[in-house]
Image (cartoon, coloured by chain):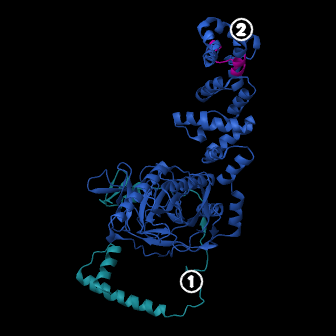
Amino acid sequence: MDAELIDRLMRLSALSLDEQQRRALSADLQRIVALIDVMQAANTEGVAPLAHPLDGCQPLRPDEVTEIVDRERFQRGAPAVRDGLYLVPRVVE
Amino acid sequence: MDQHWESVIGLEVHVQLKTRSKIFSGAATDFGAAPNAQACGVDIALPGVLPVLNAAVVRMAVLFGLAVQGRIAKRCRFDRKNYFYPDLPKGYQISQLDEPIVSGGHLDIGTEDGARRRIDLTRAHLEEDAGKSLHEAYEGYTGIDLNRAGTPLLEIVSEPQLRTPAEAARYFRTLHALVRYLDICDGDLSQGSMRCDANVSIRRPGDEFGERTEIKNLNSFRFLEKAVRFEIARQIDILEAGARVERETLLYDAERDETRPMRGKELSDDYRYFPDPDLLPVEVTEAMLEEARCAMPELPATKRRRYADELGLADYDAGWLVADPDVAAYFEDVAAASGLPKAAANWVMGEVAAAQRQDGTDAAHIPVPAAQLGRLLQRIADQTISGKIAKTLFELLWKEGGDVDSLIERRGLKQMSDADELAAVVAQVLASHPAQVDQYRAGRTKVLGFFVGQVMKETRGKANPRQVNQLLRDALA
C-alpha cells in the first residue's frame, strides 16, 4: 500500500485526506486486501461466478411514464439552482 | 492518403433508444423539456432509490441483435462504471462490461466501387446516458441538466475493420438506417440521438496495430468523416517525423477542422467496474426472442435486393431509396399506386427530393399523397399530360394540394395530341420564322429545337413533344 497507490485511490474517489487520515486509510486497506487474499484462497474450481447473491432474475417494468417530477421540491435541497439547472463549481473539459 | 500507410478505424456508436420512459426509472424521455423537469429521484440519485429495468430496452436490444445476426445472451448483467462528473449524480454509470446483451454480429456496408463489405460487430450493450453540463452561461459555475440522465442507450461497437474515413461514414449511415427501420431510435442526429466515438490508428500494411486515439462525440456523418481524415493525417505526420502517437482521447473541433486532446493523461480511465448489486441478472427468454422475430420488419439490405430484383431498379437507386425508411415507404406507395416503379423511383429521387430539400421537409411529411403522385405518373404514361406539365402540376400539388385529374381538367392542362390542331400550330410557327426555315433546309438541323420551343410556347407546354417533333420534320422535309 504505497503512497502512490493511496494518491491514485484518493484521486479516483475524489477524496481529500490529511496525513493522519491517509495513514488510517492505508492501514484499513491493508486489512481489506488481506481479507480478499483469504477469499482468493478458496477453491472455486467448477463453481459458476455469482453475479448476485439473490437467486432470481431482474423483474422488468413496462415502458410507461410513471414519475411526475416535482422539480422545485427536489431542488430545495440543492446548494445552488438557477433557471432550473443545478449549479456546481465550474467544470471545464 | 499516403500509400504506405493503412488506417485502422473502429466505431462505438451510442444509440438513444426510442422509449417513453427511462432505462431504470419511470421519468419521461421527451427531448426539449424544461431543465430537470424529467429528472426523477432515481435519475438524480436520491439516497435509497433503486433502479428497475425497462422491458422495452431489452426488447429493442434483442431486436437489434437479431437484425445483425449477433448472439443474444440468455442471461446478462449490469455493471457499475465509476467516475466522478457532476452530470453523473450517482458517481457511476450503469453499463454492461463483460456480459453484454448482444455479442458479435455484422453489418454489410456499400463500398466506393459499389460492392458490399461485411463489418463485424464486437458487441452491443445497454447503458444509461448521463446528464448535460452547460459551461458557458454562468460565471464561475457549470449548470447541470439531468433530463438526459437515465435515457437508455445501446452502445454498438464495431471491430477495427474500417479502412477509410468514407467507409467509417458509410458504416455510421448504414447503422443509422438500420436502427430507424427497427424503430428503436428516432435517428435525429441534431438532437444527439446517435453519437459516435471513433478509434483511429495507422500502420504499415501487414504490421501489428499502431497506437490508437479516440475521437469522442461525433454527431454527424460528415464530421465523422472529416475528423477521422484529419486524425489519420495527424498521425502520419507524427510517425513520419519519427515521433510516437500518444494514446489519448480527442475532441473534434468542426470550425477549425482539427482534433484536440480532451483530458490529460493523469486522468486516464480507471473505471473500477463491478457488478451492480441493485440489479439482478437479466434473462432473455425464448418468448422474448420469438416476439422479436415476429416483430422484425423488412430490413434495408433485403429491401434493396427486392427493389433491384422485383422492381427492376438500378442498384444505386435502390440503395438511395432504402437509406431512409420513410422515403422507402413513400416510394413503395407511389410505385403501388402508379404500377410504375421506375418512374416512381425517378420522381421520388428527383422532383420529390428537390422539393423536400427546398422546404426542409422530411420524408414522413411529404405533402403530396402517394396516391396523387401515382396518378400523376399514370397521366404522364398514358400521355394525358407532358412531362413538363407534370412538373408544374407537381409543384401545385406540393404547395396547394388537390386532385390530379380534376386539376388537369380544371386548368386545361391536357396534352394536345390532336394531329390537326397541332399541325395548324406547326404551320403557323414555320410561317412566322422563314429565316430559320431556310437555315434548317440549308442543313442547320439544330434549328429544330427552336421550332419545338416555339410550338410549346404557343400551346403553353401542352403539345405532345414527340408528335410535335414528327410534325415539324414532316413539314420541313
Q: Is residue B141 above or below residue B462?
A: below
**Viewer-nearest of discs 1 and 2:** 2
The residue tagged 1 is A49
Q: Identify by letter the chain in blue.
A: B
Task: Residue at 52%, 57% (x, y): give it.
Answer: B16
Q: Chain of mark 1?
A: A
- Rendering coords of residue B467 (x, y %): 72, 19
Residue B414 in view of the camera: no
Mark 2, secondary structure of its residue: helix
Residue B373 location, quadrant: top right
Q: CA distance from mark 1 to mark 2?
A: 93 Å
Output the chain of dot 2: B
Q: Is residue B348 above or below residue B195?
A: above
Q: Inspect the image, locate mark 2, and give the three-letter code of the amino acid beneath it.
A: Ala
Q: Are marks 1 and 2 in contact (CB under 8 Å)?
A: no
- The quarter of the image holding the N terminus of chain B is bottom left
Q: Amino acid at mark 1?
A: Pro
Mark 2 — residue? B424
Residue numbers of the magenta segment: B457-470
Task: Please say if B34 is above or below A26.
Answer: above
Q: Which chain is cyan in the rendering?
A: A
Residue drawn at (65%, 12%) of the image: B441
Residue B231 in view, yes or no:
yes
Residue A26: where, in percent of width, then height?
31, 86
- Residue B9 magenta: no
Provide residue A77's location: percent of width, then percent of height.
36, 61
